[in-house]
């Protein structure tokens, strides 16, 4: 009998812990609250679980040596995973595109889109090298 290897997700342990905190926060608060309130609650849950969390992290967009814009990532966990928090009925394509854009500006890596909607939902997103996650943020 041959054994097949299960592919390991980049930062799988960390993203698993983040998702556990997401579901714990959702269990306590449910849906219907503002994204700002949910971000603060999730930050508390993540920090209580021993993770380092940065909120409203600026992401600078550069083009040919010029700064042409900026975004703010909702949360960055352990300088490795970008989190975007939504509170919509369901995950929508614009939110996926927004999170992918944030990852692109951060130099690629792993992101999680969390939705505190009528039912809890998430999408794990990756751009570029997931093992070198958010290099543009670490370079600052």
Image (cartoon, rainbow, N blue to C red):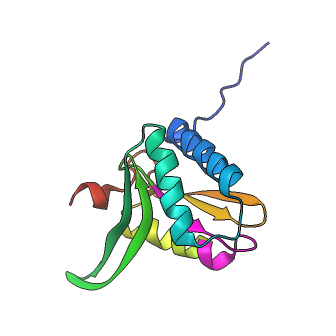
Q: Is residue 51 left or right of residue 99?
A: left
Q: Where's residue 33, x and y in %? A: 64, 70
Q: Given the current orientation, which residue lies at the most extreme top position? A: 1
Q: Quadrant of the N terminus?
A: top right
Q: Is residue 137 above or below residue 25?
A: below
In depth, the one of 10 and 94 nearer the eye is 94
Is 63 above or below relative to 133?
A: below
Q: Position of residue 98 (x, y in %)?
A: 53, 75
The one of 93 and 37 positioned closer to us in this rendering: 37
Is residue 81 shown left or right of residue 91? left
Camera-side residue: 53 or 36? Answer: 36
Residue 83 in sight from this viewpoint? no
Magenta extent: 82-95
Judge left or right: residue 32 versus residue 47: right
Q: Quadrant of the C terminus?
A: bottom left
Image quadrant where residue 30 sits: bottom right
Residue visible at 62% across and 42% down in the picture: 20
Q: Is residue 82 visible?
A: yes
Residue 123 spot, x, y in % from top left? 65, 58
113 vs 92, left or right, is left
Give me the residue at 66% from left, 57% from top.
29
Q: Position of residue 134 (x, y in %)?
A: 37, 56
State the residue in front, 81 or 52: 52
């Amino acid at each position: 009998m041959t054994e097949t290897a299960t592919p390991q997700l980049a930062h799988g342990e960390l993203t698993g812990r983040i998702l556990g905190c997401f579901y714990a926060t959702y269990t306590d608060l449910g849906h219907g609250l503002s994204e700002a309130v949910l971000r603060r609650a999730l930050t508390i849950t993540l920090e209580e679980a021993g993770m380092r969390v940065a909120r409203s992290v600026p992401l600078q967009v550069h083009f040919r040596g010029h700064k042409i814009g900026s975004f703010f990532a909702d949360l960055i966990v352990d300088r490795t995973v970008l989190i975007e928090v939504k509170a919509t009925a369901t995950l929508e394509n614009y939110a996926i595109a927004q999170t992918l854009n944030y990852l692109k500006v951060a130099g690629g890596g792993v992101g999680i889109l969390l939705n505190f909607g009528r039912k809890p939902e998430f999408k794990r997103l990756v751009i570029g090298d997931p093992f070198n996650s958010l290099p543009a943020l670490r370079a600052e």
